[in-house]
Amino acid sequence: MECWKLLVSGRVQGIGYRMAVRREGHRLGLQGLVRNLMDGSVEVLAEGDPSALSELERWCRRGPPLAEVTEVTVERLSTLRGFLDFDIG
């Protein structure tokens, strides 16, 4: 198990990006939190199997149909957060 933080920039707010991340996280068996940030980006904290996290990262680079992702930065966190579900903040 690992915990990753992804910061997603571009046209990612107001288009259902968070709900789509949540669905994809559930599909991949991950737990975490996705939320909008004040600067217009989206933050994703996700825990689970590293291969599933890599797949989520690849998905976040595309996003749902209305998204225009310009950048995704990934930080591998040193501690797990103990998420029980994949929530929207």
Image: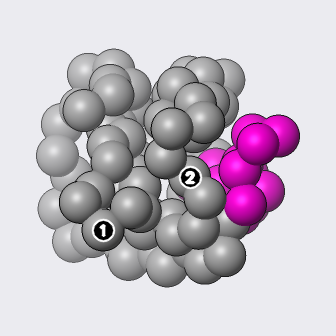
Quarter of the picture containing the C terminus is top left
Check residue 39 in the rendering and tell me which mark sits there, or answer none: 1
Residue beneath the point at 73% across and 60% down: 68
Horizontally, residue 27 falls left or right of residue 8, namely: right
Residue 51 in the image, given as x and y percentages of width and height:
66, 55
Between 5 and 36, the one lying in front of the other is 36
User: What colour scheme governs how the chains and residues are painted in the rendered image of this protein?
Assistant: one colour
Residue 65 in the image, given as x and y percentages of width and height:
82, 40
Residue beneath the point at 49% across and 46% down: 13
Task: State which region is magenta.
Answer: 53-68
Q: Is residue 29 above or below residue 76?
A: above
Question: Which residue position is annotated with label 2?
Answer: 12
Q: Residues within 10 Å of mark 2 (few under 14, many from 20)?
A: many
Q: Is residue 79 in view from this perspective?
A: yes
Q: Is residue 38 above or below residue 33?
A: below
Q: Amino acid at mark 1?
A: Asp
Residue beneath the point at 49% across and 79% down: 73
